[in-house]
Image (cartoon, rainbow, N blue to C red):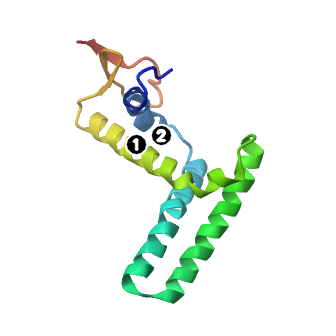
């Protein structure tokens, strides 16, 4: 689906990610936001604790990270046959997701659209008009 690798993936996800995220219902959006915050918050807490020299906060950050890994292992077991150690690098995927989401948001809000396979897409953010976005070939 993404023959040119990361560049194609970046453009493809940027095209639909912001638009698609606006269609997610509130409870799943809250759950996803919690996992994203937790995924990035616990490693940042550990890093800041090391920088500030606060050993008690390092323990809290490690416990939060360990709990996150346990939750992710449980989700992974239900979702498919993923190795347990993938749960330790989950935040790399979360970080890519967030950066792509911000890029998608910025491109849609500044009316620059999203480039994909030689075209620029300008989707409308209306639940009623979840049809084809307008397209400009270049």
In front: mark 1 or mark 2? 1
- Labelled pair 1, 2 in contact (Cβ < 8 Å): yes
Residue under label 1, please give it. 101
Q: Residue at x 40, y 76 (%)?
A: 48
Q: Nearer the viewer, residue 89 or 17?
A: 89
Up the image or down, 12 lies above or below 59; here it is above
Task: Report x, y in % for residue 120.
Answer: 29, 20
Q: In terms of image quadrants, where is residue 87?
A: bottom right
Give the secondary structure at mark 1. helix
Q: In terms of image quadrants, where is residue 89?
A: bottom right
54 on left or right of 121: right
Location of the C terminus by quadrant is top left
49 on left or right of 73: left
Task: Report x, y in % for residue 20.
Answer: 48, 34
Q: Residue at x 51, y 83 (%)?
A: 57
Give the secondary structure at mark 2. helix
| Mark 1 closeness class: few <14, some 14–19, many ≥20 residues within 10 Å | many
Up the image or down, 115 lies above or below 95; here it is above
Residue under label 2, please give it. 21
Task: Report x, y in % for residue 117.
Answer: 36, 16
């Amino acid at each position: 689906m993404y023959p040119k690798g990361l560049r194609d993936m970046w453009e493809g996800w940027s095209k639909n990610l912001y638009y698609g995220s606006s269609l997610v219902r509130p409870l799943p959006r809250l759950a996803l936001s919690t996992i994203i915050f937790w995924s990035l918050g616990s490693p940042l807490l550990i890093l800041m604790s090391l920088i500030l020299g606060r050993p008690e906060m390092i323990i809290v950050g490690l416990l939060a990270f360990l709990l996150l890994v346990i939750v992710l292992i449980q989700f992974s077991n239900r979702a498919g046959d993923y190795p347990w150690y993938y749960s330790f690098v989950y935040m790399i995927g979360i970080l890519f997701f967030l950066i792509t989401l911000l890029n998608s948001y910025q491109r849609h809000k500044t009316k620059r659209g999203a480039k994909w396979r030689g075209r620029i897409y300008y989707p409308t953010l209306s639940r009623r008009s979840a049809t084809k976005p307008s397209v400009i070939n270049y």
